[in-house]
Image (cartoon, rainbow, N blue to C red):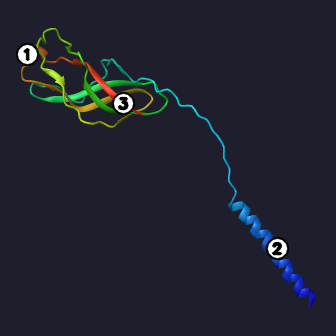
Amino acid sequence: MRRPLFVASLCAIAMAVLSGGAQAYFRSSGSGTGTTTTGTLQPVVLVALVTSDTPASTLVPGGSADLLLKVNNPNSSNVTLVGVAPKAGGSVTPSLPGCTTSGVSLATVGTLAITLTPGSNTVHISNGATMSTASVTGCQGATFAIDVTITVHK
């Protein structure tokens, strides 16, 4: 009779030890600290176009065409171009001296979501420039530099 009592006692002790260990495991807590630093986002820069940069469409009086931007993203990660607006105090400069009244302006560009990868990016904004019917004949074949301000988000 002693053997069954010994086995029962041993099982009871084993259960108490194992459940105590499990209870201690689930009731444990801890804490710690950590530090990090954030990088500095570098300004994205508009760059002058070169002769090989050509829009997919051309302006005609009373019409609209692509706005072509060349943007340099000096950051190591992508940023998103979310807006283009006329630059305060900016101007529209035609490439031909006979284009005295160009009638060219920046079209109303809605909210954008164009990814700019690190480095140089060429962006075509469909129907981003307009030309009124007030344009003079001397503007035929001209290209136009429109001063704009861009908005980007990380």
Residue 152 has which mark? 3
**Residue 86 relative to residue 46: left or right:** left
Give the Cα distance between marks 1 and 3: 37 Å
- Local packing at callout 3 (Cα closer than 10 Å; few below 14, some 14-19, many 20+) is some
Q: Which element carries disc 1, helix, strand or loop?
A: helix
Percent across and percent down for residue 134 are 6, 20
Q: Quadrant of residue 112?
A: top left
Q: Which element carries disc 2, helix, strand or loop?
A: helix
**Residue 8 relative to residue 104: left or right:** right
Which residue is depicted at the point 9% across and 27% down?
A: 62
Amino acid residing under circle 2: Ala
Picture layout, residue 85 above or below residue 112: above
Amino acid residing under circle 3: Val
Q: Earlier in the sequence, mark 2 or mark 3?
A: 2
Percent across and percent down for residue 150 are 31, 26
Residue under label 1 = 137
Front tag of 2 and 1: 2
